[in-house]
Image (cartoon, grey):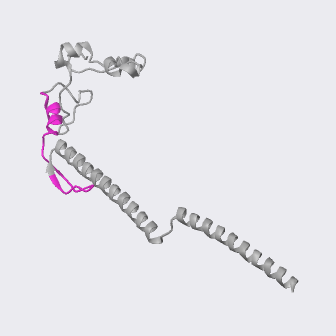
Amino acid sequence: LDSDGNNFSMTDGGTLLSTLNVGTDTTGILQTVQVRQSLANNPSLIATGQLDDVTPPAIGAAAVTSGDASTVQAMANVFTKQLSIPAAGGLSLMTTTVGGYGANILSINAVNAANASNTQQFQDTLLQSLQTKLQSASGVNLDEELSSMILFQNAYTASARVITTASDMLKTLSDMV
């Protein structure tokens, strides 16, 4: 803290992490981050002033001094202030809060995800239907065709034996005459 107790600065006695009292153990990182005790005891030590960009400070004078919490309030107001947000990413031009805009982004993404899922299910069902129709239209059932081929092969073999036997009988008969 400076001499009047309104401004503070940090000096690094080792690393920034050690200055902020942040440990390197990542299993409990939220337990190791803490507010400095002097600030917890006296919150008025936190600089809440606003930079005066209209009147530049004199050389050597502090640019930010204690204030009336207007900076913190201005930051908080951003979340409740109505903003005009241009059209982007499937969202039209709108006037809403930051939270409302975030909700709209989540909403449109949820709708897009549901549409993509429905389209995928439709495409899968259509593919299955077309494959079934193709198989029934071609009329080729491999099991039936293989069975028929075996039957034809056996019939051919039997016919060949009959012809061979008839040929042998005719040869024998012609040799007798």
User: Which residue is painted at 35% across and 59% down in the image?
Assistant: 125
Q: Residue furthest bottom?
A: 177
**Residue 96 shown in magenta:** no
Residue 65 x %, y %: 19, 26
Q: Quadrant of residue 93?
A: bottom left
Residue 170, image x and y in percent?
80, 82
Q: Nearer the viewer, residue 82 or 44?
A: 82
Residue 146 location in percent, x, y?
Answer: 58, 64
Quarter holding residue 52: top left
Q: Which residues are magenta?
A: 68-94
Q: Nearer the viewer, residue 123 or 14?
A: 123
**Quadrant of the rendering where the N terminus is positioned:** top left
Image quadrant containing the C terminus: bottom right
| 168 left or right of 23 in image | right
Compared with 104, 142 (above or below) is: below
Q: What residue appears at the point 14 percent right and 28 percent down from the top-left corner? A: 69
From this view, report whether residue 95 is shown above or below residue 131. Answer: above
Query: Compared with residue 45, is residue 106 higher up or lower down, i.e. above or below?
Result: below
Taking the image as shown, residue 54 lies to the left or right of residue 27, namely: left
Identify the residue shown where x is 73% and y is 72%.
161
> Where in the figure is residue 131, as x and y percent of width and height?
43, 64
Picture quadrant where residue 164 is located: bottom right
How many numbered dots are placed on residues in this image? 0
| Nearer the observer, 170 or 82 | 170
